[in-house]
């Protein structure tokens, strides 16, 4: 027992010496700079005594309390459907009857449809860009700019933030207007085929014209080459002209090229 007590006293003595050494080192050492992490950069401090419990899962800051501008956050809100306790009068999806509606389609396109139905029925609820709408349904820019005809969803351009916003149209609206404009979707298909045929004809005509020009240039070059070989004329030479008859025309003595000249008297 005496040995155990002696060991305990020695351990206490060593602990006191170590504590005294650590305290002396801490007084002489410089305080370390606290480096903020990325997670702490967006920290907001709120005074819970000035907040009201809305009983809806979040706290609302008192409007009378003057808060700092750093605490204010930009909130983008989408109008929600008013709650109706009567299950028979609640707003439902026009396809499946679900009450979980897509708020973007309801607010922008005024269409009551849920997100699963949007994915299941792309022929009606898929979104098309402005370029796709012009190509698929042969619509003009002035028609697509009419917001009474086509509600549009403007989003930031995914390719580059500095470019113009991307305009998205619902396929059902485009198809119904195109059917009225072209008097049916069958006439739209005929007009589409007619434009394709015209484009193909213009391309073939341009190709034939280029072939004709190539042949004409080839014949001229062959004739020029044969004539130069017959007259022993170099490809590059300096023309030497002599007047012909009345003097209004001159002819090269080497290659035979004839030019017209005008004489001015002063």
Image: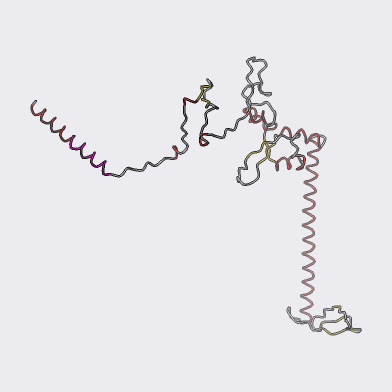
Residue 250 x/y as whole percent: 85, 82
Vertical side of 182 occupied by 214: above or below: below
Res 128 quadrant in image: top right
Residue 255 x/y as whole percent: 80, 80
* Magenta span dominant secondary structure: helix
> Along the horizontal axis of the image, is 154 left or right of 32?
right
Residue 239 x/y as whole percent: 78, 82
* Residue shown at the point (79%, 77%) measured from the top left: 227
- For the C terminus, the image quarter is bottom right
Along the line of sight, the residue nearer the viewer: 125 or 15: 15
- For the N terminus, the image quarter is top left
> Along the horizontal axis of the image, is 83 left or right of 206?
left
Residue 8 x/y as whole percent: 14, 30
Span colored in magenta: 15-28
Along the line of sight, the residue nearer the viewer: 107 or 44: 44
Res 230 quadrant in image: bottom right
> Along the horizontal axis of the image, is 52 left or right of 124?
left
State how many labels appear. Answer: 0
**Colouring mode (rainbow / by chain / secondary structure / one colour):** secondary structure
* Residue shown at the point (78%, 56%) measured from the top left: 206
Res 190 quadrant in image: top right
Along the line of sight, the residue nearer the viewer: 94 or 207: 94
Vertical side of 233 occupied by 140: above or below: above
Along the line of sight, the residue nearer the viewer: 260 or 143: 143
* Residue shown at the point (67%, 29%) measured from the top left: 107
Q: Is residue 104 magenta?
A: no
* Residue shown at the point (61%, 42%) measured from the top left: 158
Q: Residue furthest right?
A: 246
């Amino acid at each position: 027992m005496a040995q155990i007590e002696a060991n305990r006293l020695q351990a206490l003595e060593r602990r006191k010496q170590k504590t005294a050494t650590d305290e002396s080192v801490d007084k002489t050492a410089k305080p370390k700079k606290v480096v903020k992490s990325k997670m702490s950069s967006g920290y907001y401090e709120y005074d819970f005594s000035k907040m009201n419990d809305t009983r809806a899962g979040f706290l609302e800051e008192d409007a009378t309390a003057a808060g700092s501008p750093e605490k204010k956050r930009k909130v983008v809100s989408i109008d929600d459907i008013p709650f109706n306790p009567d299950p028979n009068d609640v707003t439902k999806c026009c396809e499946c009857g679900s009450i979980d509606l897509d708020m973007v389609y309801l607010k922008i396109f005024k269409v009551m449809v849920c997100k699963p139905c949007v994915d299941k029925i792309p022929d009606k609820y898929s979104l098309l860009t402005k370029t796709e709408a012009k190509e698929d349904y042969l619509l003009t820019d002035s028609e697509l700019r009419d917001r009474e005809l086509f509600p549009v969803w403007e989003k930031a351009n995914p390719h580059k933030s500095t470019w113009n916003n991307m305009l998205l149209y619902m396929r059902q609206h485009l198809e119904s207007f195109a059917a009225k404009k072209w008097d049916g979707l069958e006439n739209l298909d005929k007009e589409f085929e007619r434009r394709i045929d015209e484009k193909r004809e213009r391309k073939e005509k341009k190709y034939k014209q280029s072939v004709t020009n190539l042949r004409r240039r080839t014949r001229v070059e062959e004739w020029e080459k044969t004539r130069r070989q017959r007259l022993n004329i170099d490809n590059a030479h300096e023309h030497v002209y002599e007047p012909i008859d009345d003097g209004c025309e001159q002819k090269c003595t080497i290659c035979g090229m004839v030019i017209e000249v005008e004489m001015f008297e002063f």
